Image: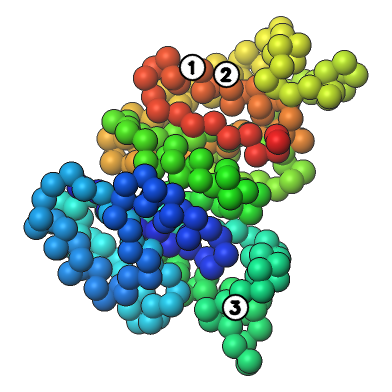
């Protein structure tokens, strides 16, 4: 039996996440009052079976109820319920833009509370859930299609191991906020300065050959691989379900893409469940 608690900022994609889970066979309830979560958890625990459930909990709850969430969650887990928290987030500018484009009303905004202040208040109100999240997803640069694919890959596919996501990114576009580990590959030779390689990416063979021929790159790749092999079993032993590892270079086109692909292939050979995301590639 599995219970996924979906929370996050309004406009970050919670409805898309719940709809994706429902399409995948989860029994879903949106906007469940926190005060009813304990009773709901006890009910599904008592019924037994292999069903999967997902509930949406957001800032429409009373603030005092949200502060009680950690103790309620601990109670559910003490009863043996596999309860996971997925928290969706996005930066303020993106949330403001999304509300402007859709003309939706923010649940906390009003005549005396501007949208920007409502978003900040929502962040503060949801902090008890954000701090306990097993998986945080930053949707700032994620399309609806990409979000659906990510939810399917990390939450609905059968897995017996820690779910690892490897993500490439460009520092000039900002560091991912949802990564557990961030590795900086800007110290490595940059294919961007090779005219023939500049329009290619780290998935193209000429770029792969260029980086494979550099001893410094091989050393970097080996040490990151060793780090992952050493520490993934430790995280799994601590009952971690998800781990996000980001590797960045300047533009997110060559070095980081190459390293993510190489590391993913290596981990898959170790029978580790890996998903790959290249944030700056179309």
Secondary element under disc 2, as helix, strand or loop, is: helix
Is 157 left or right of 215, judged from the image as shown? left
**Image position of 106 with respect to 10: above or below:** below
Return the mark for residue 63: none
Q: Position of residue 154 (x, y in %)?
A: 42, 40
Label 1 belongs to which residue? 266
The reply to whether callout 2 and callout 1 are in contact (CB within 8 Å) is yes
In the foreground, 103 or 109: 103
Q: CA distance from mark 3 to mark 2?
A: 44 Å
Q: Around disc 2, counting alpha carbons within 10 Å, would you say few (fewer than 14), some (14 to 19), or many (20 or more)?
A: some
Question: Which residue is found at the position 33% from the left and 42% from the top?
Answer: 240
Label 3 belongs to which residue? 105
**Image position of 156 with respect to 253: above or below:** below
Secondary element under disc 3, as helix, strand or loop, is: loop
Pointer 1 or 3: first along the chain = 3
For the C terminus, which image quadrant?
top right
Question: Which residue is found at the position 57% from the left and 43% from the top?
Answer: 146
Q: Around disc 3, counting alpha carbons within 10 Å, would you say few (fewer than 14), some (14 to 19), or many (20 or more)?
A: few
For this orientation, the residue located farthest to the bottom is: 112
Pointer 3 or 2: first along the chain = 3
Label 2 belongs to which residue? 262
Is 77 left or right of 211, judged from the image as shown? left
Question: Which residue is found at the position 70% from the left and 22% from the top?
Answer: 202
Q: Position of residue 10 (x, y in %)?
A: 54, 68
Q: Around disc 1, counting alpha carbons within 10 Å, would you say few (fewer than 14), some (14 to 19), or many (20 or more)?
A: some
- Residue 52 seen by the camera: yes
**Viewer-nearest of labels 3 and 2?**
3
Q: CA distance from mark 1 to mark 3?
A: 46 Å
Question: Which residue is found at the position 42% from the left and 14% from the top?
Answer: 269
Secondary element under disc 1, as helix, strand or loop, is: helix
**Viewer-nearest of labels 1 and 3?**
3
């Amino acid at each position: 039996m599995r219970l996924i608690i979906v929370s996050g900022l309004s406009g970050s994609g919670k409805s898309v996440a719940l709809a994706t889970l429902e399409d995948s066979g989860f029994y879903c309830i949106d906007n469940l009052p926190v005060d009813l979560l304990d009773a709901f958890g006890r009910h599904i625990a008592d019924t037994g079976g292999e069903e999967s459930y997902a509930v949406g909990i957001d800032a429409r709850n009373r603030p005092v109820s949200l502060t009680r969430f950690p103790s309620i969650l601990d109670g559910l887990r003490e009863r043996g319920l596999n309860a996971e928290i997925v928290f969706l987030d996005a930066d303020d500018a993106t949330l403001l833009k999304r509300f402007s484009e859709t003309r939706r009303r923010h649940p906390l905004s009003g005549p005396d509370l501007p949208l920007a202040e409502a978003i900040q208040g929502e962040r503060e109100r949801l902090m008890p859930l954000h701090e306990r999240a097993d998986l945080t997803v930053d949707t700032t640069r994620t399309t609806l299609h990409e979000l659906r694919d990510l939810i399917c890959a990390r939450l609905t596919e059968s897995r017996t191991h820690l779910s690892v996501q490897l993500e490439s990114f460009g520092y000039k576009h900002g560091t991912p906020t949802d990564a557990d580990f961030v590795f900086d590959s800007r110290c490595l030779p940059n294919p961007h300065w090779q005219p023939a390689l500049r329009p290619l990416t780290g998935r193209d063979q000429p770029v792969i050959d260029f980086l494979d021929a550099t001893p410094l790159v091989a050393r970097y790749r080996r040490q990151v691989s060793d780090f992952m092999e050493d520490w993934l079993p430790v995280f799994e032993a601590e009952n971690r379900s998800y781990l996000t590892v980001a590797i960045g270079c300047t533009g997110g086109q060559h070095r980081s893409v190459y390293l993510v692909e190489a590391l993913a292939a290596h981990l898959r050979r170790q029978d580790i469940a890996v998903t790959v995301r290249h944030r700056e590639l179309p």
